[in-house]
Image: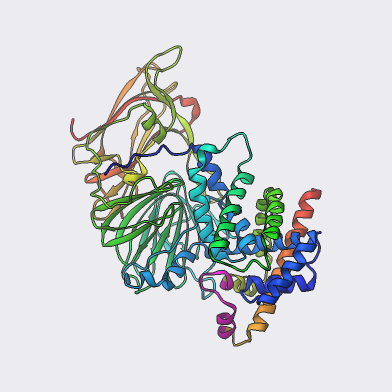
């Protein structure tokens, strides 16, 4: 069987695509609200980006273009899954997507600030975050392990996330003034 | 709108993040977001934080966790396939989760050549790690082209990281390695059923229960060669998977133009010559001058600076030379070394300088074969500077830098060849590099 080998995209495209993975994943989480779905759609997005590499104009900004491809894949995924779009309808998702595209450049500074803010958490709080976000981490399991209720555990996570969000904003504001 | 999130919105977002948002809560959240640009800003920033935590803590094994629940892989209990994989970016400064029990060390540095650095989940970092150091889960990086490091788990599993390799390593309910870039080989002790060791690269997921293999990763392709046992490798691009058994190899690319297949590995030839065509030039780190220059048309290669290793304080030791690496699909192997193999090249320097030759190897049956070095003394006063000299180095006489991996270069395959001096003023240039199995 003959399988002609297609020439690959240029190295610059591959580098851009690699750099964009984290931001694309975050963008998809904001549209799909489910990290597992975002995993699947990111894979599908990468395949389309690869196939469309020849259409990309290297003089343009890669991220907005890639975000639009991801947005299309996300909408198609929701349609395939027959997820109810009574709540997050197409118009709201488009609005979230448009605003996320405009803020794409903010993602890396926010991530860097998050890393610093995580260091400032107390050790038991960091451990709670690690446990929640590791594979299979669930509030119910964690509550059982700690001998507490899911509601109490959720409240702990809520306080930690609040602290992280405030810390991130303070750090970014300080850096903007510097 | 950068202040605190309003309480109702915060409650809804946290419920969403923890999978506890009921349908009426989702409706309420959508209503708030639809009418309020500030709320949408809070939503985007909250979800970006949520995604970042997931990416760094969970994406290394999310595919495996979901695969364990997928019924269509239930029969393949020896392999435990991954369902899908996020193609990871090559990033520095990553946050990583620590062991379930807290901050227990998971690996011991068994041997190093060059330098190894480590960054932990709590932001701590160490460079220039010595043999015997015990480390928690984190990001491991061999600093410098010629650096290698052997890490040992408590169950006897060993992982060797090659030069300029970056990998996130953890051990919770199973061992997880995210090979972001570079080369690693592993000799894996039998793993508990249903909890294989998983290696993830930008283009593939590899799961093993007990085997010896080597894998090389770069952004658009992953090559694997298995020495013992069997692994399953799944290609990210289309989910196609292949079982790779002992003495077989396979490649997973970012594209899906070719079907995945395990094949007999192409033995690296025992005779090799460095060409200066485009294909070779892509694997050479040097100033390639295939037509010489205006003053001298001799095809040659000029030295370029590279990081050889890092000191304990993190400062780099720079050398100046050329490096040659083999193709990813052969796990970097490009020439076989036999008992009588000789490395030859012509070289010249602008001033007297010692020239170092280093090879990093893979060994059949033992995977990582060790690093070997030879030094050519600086030319004496009788040699005119700028005059071409011929170097001939018997590979088997080269000094082993990691004796635990091997004391002789014979019966190995070269993954990396480095020829260098210590200073840019040495002006090292090299031509006609070859490796032959005999004189």
Q: Please tell me which residue is depicted at 22% across the width and 46% down the height of the picture.
A: B411
- Horizontally, is B253 left or right of A124 in the view? left
The correct choice, above or below, for A154 with respect to B4 in the image is: below
Q: Which SS does the magenta portion mostly show?
A: helix
Q: Quadrant of residue B70?
A: bottom left
Q: Please tell me which residue is depicted at 53% across the width and 40% down the height of the picture.
A: A13
Name the one closer to the observer, A175 or A29. A29
Q: Quadrant of the N terminus of chain B?
A: bottom right
- Horizontally, is B370 left or right of A90 in the view? left
Q: Please tell me which residue is depicted at 43% across the width and 54% down the height of the picture.
A: B236
Residue stretch in magenta:
A131-145
Within the magenta stretch, is there residue A143?
Answer: yes
Residue B425 image offset from top left, x and y in percent: 50, 25
Residue B166 image offset from top left, x and y in percent: 47, 52
Residue B91 image offset from top left, x and y in percent: 55, 51
Tally the numbered discs: 0
């Amino acid at each position: 069987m003959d399988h002609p080998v297609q020439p690959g995209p240029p190295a610059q495209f591959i580098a851009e695509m690699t750099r964009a993975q984290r931001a694309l994943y975050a963008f998809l989480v904001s549209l799909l609200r489910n990290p597992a779905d975002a995993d699947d759609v990111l894979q599908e997005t990468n395949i389309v980006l690869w196939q469309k590499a020849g259409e990309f104009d290297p003089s343009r900004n890669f991220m907005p273009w890639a975000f639009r491809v991801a947005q299309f894949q996300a909408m198609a995924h929701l349609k395939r899954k027959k997820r109810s779009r009574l709540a997050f309808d197409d118009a709201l998702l488009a609005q979230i997507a448009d605003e996320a595209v405009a803020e794409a450049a903010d993602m890396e500074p926010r991530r860097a600030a998050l890393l610093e803010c995580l260091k400032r958490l107390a050790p038991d709080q960091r451990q709670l975050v690690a446990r929640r976000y590791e594979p299979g981490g669930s509030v119910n399991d964690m509550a059982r392990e700690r001998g507490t209720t899911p509601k109490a555990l959720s409240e702990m996570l809520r306080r930690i996330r609040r602290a992280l969000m405030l810390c991130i904003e303070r750090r970014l504001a300080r850096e903007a003034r510097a | 709108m950068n202040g605190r999130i309003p309480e109702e919105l915060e409650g809804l977002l946290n419920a969403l993040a923890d999978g506890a948002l009921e349908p009426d809560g989702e409706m309420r959240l959508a209503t708030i977001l639809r009418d309020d640009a500030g709320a949408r800003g809070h939503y985007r920033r909250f979800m970006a934080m949520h995604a970042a935590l997931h990416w760094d803590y969970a994406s290394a094994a999310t595919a495996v966790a979901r695969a364990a629940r997928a019924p269509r892989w239930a029969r393949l209990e020896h392999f435990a396939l991954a369902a899908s994989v996020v193609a990871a970016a090559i990033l520095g400064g990553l946050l990583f989760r620590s062991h379930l029990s807290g901050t227990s060390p998971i690996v011991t540095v068994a041997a190093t050549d060059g330098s190894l650095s480590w960054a932990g989940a709590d932001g701590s970092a160490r460079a220039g790690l010595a043999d015997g150091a015990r480390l928690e889960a984190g990001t491991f990086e061999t600093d410098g082209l010629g650096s290698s490091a052997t890490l040992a788990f408590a169950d006897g599993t060993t992982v060797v990281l090659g030069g300029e390799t970056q990998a996130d390593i953890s051990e919770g309910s199973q061992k997880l390695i995210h090979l972001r870039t570079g080369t690693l080989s592993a000799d894996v002790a039998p793993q508990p059923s249903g909890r294989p060791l998983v290696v993830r690269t930008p283009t593939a997921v590899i799961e093993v229960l007990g085997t010896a293999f080597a894998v090389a990763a770069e952004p658009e392709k992953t090559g694997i060669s298995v020495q013992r046992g069997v692994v399953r490798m799944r290609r990210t691009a289309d989910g196609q998977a292949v079982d790779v058994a002992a003495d077989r190899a396979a490649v997973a690319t970012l594209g899906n133009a070719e079907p995945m297949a395990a094949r007999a590995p192409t033995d690296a030839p025992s005779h090799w010559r460095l060409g200066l065509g485009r294909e070779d030039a892509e694997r050479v780190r040097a100033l390639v001058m295939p037509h010489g220059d205006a003053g001298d048309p001799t095809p040659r290669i000029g030295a370029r600076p590279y990081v050889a290793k890092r000191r304990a304080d993190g400062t780099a030791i720079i050398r100046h030379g050329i490096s040659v690496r083999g193709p990813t699909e052969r796990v970097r192997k490009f020439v076989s070394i036999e008992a009588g193999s000789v490395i030859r090249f012509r070289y010249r320097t602008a001033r007297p300088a010692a020239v170092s030759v280093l090879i990093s190897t893979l060994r059949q049956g033992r995977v990582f074969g060790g690093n070997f070095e030879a030094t050519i003394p600086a030319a004496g006063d009788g040699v005119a500077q700028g005059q071409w000299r011929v170097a001939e180095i018997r590979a088997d006489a080269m000094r082993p830098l990691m004796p635990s991996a091997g004391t002789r270069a014979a019966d190995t395959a070269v993954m990396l060849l480095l020829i260098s001096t210590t200073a840019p003023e040495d002006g090292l240039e090299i031509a006609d590099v070859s490796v032959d199995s005999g004189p």
